[in-house]
Image (cartoon, grey):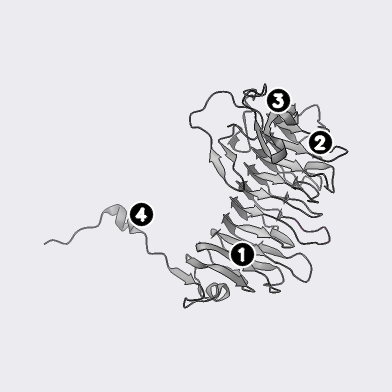
């Protein structure tokens, strides 16, 4: 029998089955590798690390590998500080390119300078999927590095430990790109729910709500402006907020060459007793598009004359299915249904929602091929 010849594509490694086997490192109490710290020492570039579900107290690590995947198996992997930290920065320090972490919970990050984080992203690029952060000084904190990229999908950034006001649920430095979707940011304390200095920001289909007892400052801040697409989010300021502004853009200096904010199809809720202010924009000539937003409560919507404003509506609480229980879907008979208008394009995206947020974290796709009129606000169903 003649030997089977490999195809040209297979020989070149261009077919899926021609790919080389990915090394898998298994971690857990009954495994040969029993700790995350040991796995971090042994792993090489391209490794997949599968971690058995359970509590990993004081098991902190630095991850320099490129093309690394950390994946929880059989349930949640809970990384608990228990007084430990790495490099004086947090529970995990990541510096590799194209890293991915799935199914991990981070809690108890405390460091001497009181600026500890569940994850410190110092270099490279990172994707987080189905991870949670609670009771840390910061949830995730990134360095100022213009080559960093960060993607966050279906994550939970929860309560912050008491601190001195420098701590935030998510604090992204001056990086190349931030993308956040399907995630819940809540129960801030003095700092912001989401603060970013990134050049490009896509904040799509999330819930940023300070919740009862929350004491966040801004719900959403783009400290140095840049380009920000904020679409399909439920953003709510609590009655105990420490700042009247809900969203802030560029107030710490417009350091990026391009300055544009696209605030489209969001449901914005203010519960501050004396009323708040929806939006604060400092760069005087920034491009600002406000389209198809629902505004609930009685704050001020300050706006400059050159801003594009289209189909934004103030909505009473009884327009919604059950606003008192955070169900901000418009009632079937609401007069606001179908009143959204075409918002065009911006920030590299068509400004028309394709998904909506699903609590407690995640998204659901809207019907494909739905070219009909949408409704204002974050929820279409």
For marks 2 and 4 on the same chain, the one whose residue lies earlier in the sequence: 4
Closest to the camera, between mark 1 and mark 3, is: 3
Check disc 2 and report the residue beneath it.
284
Query: Residues in magenta?
Result: 164-168
The correct choice, above or below, for 48 with respect to 179 in the image is below
* Disc 3 from disc 2: Cα separation: 20 Å
Q: What is the number of the mark on residue 310?
A: 3
In the picture of the structure, the residue carrying the numbered disc 4 is 16
Is 44 within the magenta?
A: no
CA gap, disc 3 and disc 4: 47 Å
In the rendered image, the vertical position of residue 262 relative to residue 16, given as above or below? above
Question: Mark 1 = which residue?
Answer: 94
Image position of 353 (left or right of 67)? right
SS state under label 3: strand
For marks 1 and 3, give the CA distance.
42 Å
Whichever of labels 1 and 4 marks the residue nearer the N terminus, that label is 4
On the picture, is 282 further left or further right than 149?
Answer: right
Q: Can you give x and y, in whole percent of width and height, for residue 349 in the image?
A: 59, 36
């Amino acid at each position: 029998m003649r030997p089977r010849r490999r195809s040209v594509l297979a020989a070149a490694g261009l077919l899926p089955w021609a790919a080389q086997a990915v090394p898998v490192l298994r971690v857990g109490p009954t495994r040969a590798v029993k700790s995350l710290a040991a796995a971090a020492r042994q792993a090489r570039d391209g490794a997949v690390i599968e971690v058995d579900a359970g509590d990993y107290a004081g098991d902190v690590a630095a991850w320099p590998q490129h093309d690394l995947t950390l994946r929880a198996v059989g349930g949640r992997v809970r990384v608990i500080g228990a007084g430990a930290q790495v490099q004086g920065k947090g529970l995990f320090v990541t510096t590799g390119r194209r890293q991915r972490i799935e199914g991990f919970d981070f809690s108890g990050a405390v460091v001497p300078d009181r600026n500890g984080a569940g994850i410190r992203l110092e270099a490279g690029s990172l994707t987080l999927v189905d991870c949670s952060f609670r009771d840390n000084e910061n949830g995730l904190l990134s360095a100022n590095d213009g080559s960093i990229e960060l993607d966050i999908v279906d994550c939970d950034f929860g309560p912050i430990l008491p601190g001195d006001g420098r701590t935030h649920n998510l604090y992204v430095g001056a990086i190349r790109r931030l993308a956040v979707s399907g995630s819940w940011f809540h129960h801030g304390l003095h700092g912001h729910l989401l603060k970013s200095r990134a050049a490009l920001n896509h904040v799509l289909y999330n819930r940023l709500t300070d919740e009862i007892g929350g004491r966040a400052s801004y719900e959403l801040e783009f400290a140095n402006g840049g380009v920000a697409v904020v679409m399909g989010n439920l953003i709510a300021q609590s009655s105990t907020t420490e700042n009247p502004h809900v969203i802030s853009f560029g107030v710490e200096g417009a350091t990026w060459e391009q300055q544009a904010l696209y605030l489209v199809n969001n449901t914005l809720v203010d519960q501050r007793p004396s009323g708040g202010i929806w939006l604060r924009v400092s760069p005087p000539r920034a491009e600002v598009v406000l389209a198809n937003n629902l505004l609930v409560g009685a704050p001020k919507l300050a706006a400059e004359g050159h801003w594009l404003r289209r189909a934004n509506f103030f909505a009473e609480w009884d327009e919604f299915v059950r606003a008192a229980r955070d169900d901000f879907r418009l009632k079937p008979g609401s007069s606001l249904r179908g009143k959204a208008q075409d918002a065009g394009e911006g920030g590299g995206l068509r400004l028309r929602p394709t998904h909506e947020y699903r609590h407690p974290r995640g998204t659901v796709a809207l019907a494909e091929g739905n070219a009909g009129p949408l409704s204002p606000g974050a929820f279409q169903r």
